[in-house]
């Protein structure tokens, strides 16, 4: 037989891992909310969370968004708004170090991944309502 036969020493695996396997785990809703609250409070303690009045762009211009982010003094940043803003999203999708989402799209992994998180005032209210 072939040297790659599973029966041979150094041969192939009999049932190798499939790329279709899903290793995600279910997280209970209360635990998810508690984790989100813990991460947000840690960001506040470390001074990595900023709150602004609002972030509006007149047109989907990446240059305008880059200037606003430079005005904040941040390089890698996650921006969370209260509702989906198409101009803001279109302006940010070409920037590798900027992630724009609404409150529903904010997950614990991306909150931890970015060194700076910017929230609008309305987004803070929505998050507070969701965590209570």
Image: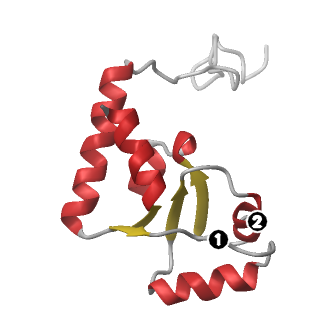
Image quarter (top left, top right, bottom left or bottom right) of the C terminus: top left
Query: Which residue occupies the foreground of this view, 44 or 23?
Result: 44
Q: Say above or below: 75 vs 81.
A: below
Residue at the left extreme, as displayed: 45
The image quadrant of residue 66 is: bottom right
Q: Say above or below: 85 vs 98.
A: above
Q: Residue under label 2, please give it.
A: 87
Q: Say above or below: 35 vs 17.
A: below
Helix, strand or loop for disc 1:
loop
Q: Are marks 1 and 2 in contact (CB under 8 Å)?
A: yes
Drawn side of residue 2 relative to residue 69, left or right? right
Query: Which residue occupies the foreground of this view, 93 or 113?
Result: 93
Label 1 – label 2 distance at C-alpha = 8 Å
Number of disc labels: 2
Q: How is the model colour-coded?
A: secondary structure
Q: Residue under label 1, please give it.
A: 56
The local crowd at label 2, few if under 14, some if 14 to 19, many if 20 or more residues have their Cα within 10 Å, is: some
Tell me if residue 115 can be seen: no
Task: Give the number of the mark in front: 1 or 2.
Answer: 1
Q: Residue at x 36, y 29 (%)?
A: 32
Drawn side of residue 108 relative to residue 19, left or right? left
Horizontal and vertical percent for residue 54? Answer: 53, 68
Horizontal and vertical percent for residue 90? Answer: 78, 64
Tell me if residue 11 can be seen: yes
Q: Residue at x 46, y 83 (%)?
A: 72
């Amino acid at each position: 037989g072939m040297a790659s036969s599973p029966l041979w020493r150094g041969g192939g695996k009999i049932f190798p891992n499939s790329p279709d396997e899903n290793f995600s785990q279910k997280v209970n809703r209360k635990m998810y909310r508690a984790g989100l609250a813990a991460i947000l409070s840690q960001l506040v303690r470390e001074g990595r969370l900023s709150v602004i009045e609002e972030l509006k762009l007149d047109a989907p211009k990446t240059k305008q968004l880059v200037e606003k982010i430079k005005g904040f003094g941040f390089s890698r940043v996650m921006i969370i708004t209260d509702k989906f803003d198409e101009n803001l999203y279109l302006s940010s999708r070409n920037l590798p170090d900027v992630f724009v989402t609404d409150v529903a799209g904010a997950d614990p992994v991306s909150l931890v991944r970015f060194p700076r998180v910017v929230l609008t005032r309305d987004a803070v209210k929505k998050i507070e309502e969701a965590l209570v």
